[in-house]
Image (spheres, rainbow, N blue to C red):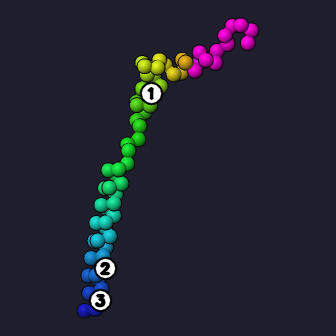
Amino acid sequence: MKKKALEDKKRKLDEQAAALLASKKARLHKEAHPASSESEIDMGIFSEQRGNLLEQIFAASAPTGNGE
């Protein structure tokens, strides 16, 4: 009888712990910001507003032709 009561208590505690963990995971998932996708990162590099960032870097590092 005592063993069954302890098993019941343990099961209830396990269920409570599982419920708390699930609610905490749901809250953290809700608060977390999604990571940028590759396409969003590529759009940032090849943005029409700024021009092609790689071309700007290349142009800035290219020799100016005045003996440098």
Q: Residues within 10 Å of mark 2 (few under 14, many from 20)?
A: few
- Residue 28 covered by magenta stretch: no
Q: Where on the picture, by quarter, is residue 3?
A: bottom left
**For mark 2, what is the residue?**
10
Picture quadrant where residue 7 is located: bottom left
The N terminus lies in quadrant: bottom left
The kind of residue on which mark 1 rests is: Gly
Which of the two discs, 1 and 2, sits closer to the camera? 1
Question: Which dot, 3 or 1, sits closer to the camera?
Answer: 1
Mark 1 sits on what residue? 44
How much space separates mark 3 and mark 1, taking CA atoms? 63 Å
Q: Residue at x 29, y 71 (%)?
A: 16
Which mark sits nearer the N-terminus, 1 or 2?
Answer: 2
Relative to 43, residue 30 above or below: below
In this view of the protein, which residue sits in the foreground, 64 or 14?
64
Quarter of the view holding residue 59 = top right
- Residue 8 pos. (x, y %): 26, 82
Give the spatial CA distance, label 3 vs label 2. Answer: 10 Å
Distance from label 1 to label 2 (Cα)?
A: 53 Å
The x and y percentages for residue 33 are 38, 44
Q: Earlier in the sequence, mark 3 or mark 2?
A: 3
Q: Is residue 20 left or right of residue 37?
A: left
Question: Magenta stretch containing residue 67, yes or no?
Answer: yes
Name the residue beneath numbered marker 3.
Answer: 3
Outermost residue on the top side: it is 66
Q: Residues within 10 Å of mark 1 (few under 14, many from 20)?
A: some
